[in-house]
Image (cartoon, grey):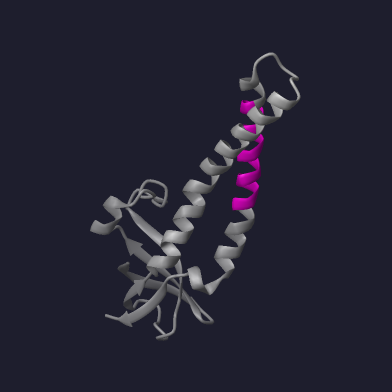
Amino acid sequence: MREEGVVIDTYGEFAKVEARRSASCEGCASKDTCKPDSNASMIIEVINPVNARVGDRICFEVEAGALLKSTFVIYLMPVIFLLIGAWVGGEISKIYPLFKREEILSVISGSLFFLVSVFILISLNRYFSKNKKYKPTIKEIL
């Protein structure tokens, strides 16, 4: 996915880019969460292999594979953990009938698995933010 923006800061091999929402943002599931302020601009850290300078208008790209992988992790992993946790709770309640209704243990187990997925996501966020493979890259200065 290619987008345009303006470099607002550079440091080492990275740059901070202010990017405006484009037409491709309208179809994105995260369009409401990545809008930090009312003027619809985003500040993004990108890899700067073309040595763009402050004020340059640039074109940057996010690789589709990285975008799909991170989207899967963020949105589907908690749901999968929740469902697996509910199933595990149901199976445990059949073996060890602690409660008269297995739904109670399913809800508790599903909630615990969901919380575990949140902690895993926090750890993965650190990994994704440090890994260059998941960062956008400046392709050209416009």
Q: Residue at x 32, y 76 (%)?
A: 58
Q: Measured along the vertical axis of the image, is residue 102 above or below residue 11?
A: above
Question: Residue 43 appears at what percent x and percent y?
Answer: 42, 62
- Residue 53 is a magenta residue: no
**In this orientation, which residue lies closer to the viewer: 47 or 119?**
119
Q: Quadrant of the N terminus?
A: bottom left
Question: Residue 118 appears at what percent x and percent y?
Answer: 61, 45
Question: Residue 29 appears at what percent x and percent y?
Answer: 36, 48
**Quadrant in the rendering for residue 110:** top right
Counting labels gives: 0
Stretch in magenta = 106-121
Question: Principal SS element in the magenta part?
Answer: helix
**Quadrant in the rendering for residue 137:** bottom left
- Residue 118 is a magenta residue: yes
**Quadrant in the rendering for residue 141:** bottom left
Question: Residue 36 appears at what percent x and percent y?
Answer: 42, 51
Q: Residue at x 48, y 58 (%)?
A: 70
Left or right relative to 119: residue 37: left
Q: Residue at x 45, y 55 (%)?
A: 71
Q: Measured along the vertical axis of the image, is residue 75 above or below residue 98?
A: below
Left or right relative to 58: residue 131: right
Q: Measured along the vertical axis of the image, is residue 4 above or below residue 85?
A: below
Q: Residue at x 76, y 24 (%)?
A: 96
* Residue furthest left in the image: 23
Q: Quadrant of the C terminus?
A: bottom left
Q: Measured along the vertical axis of the image, is residue 70 above or below residue 15?
A: above
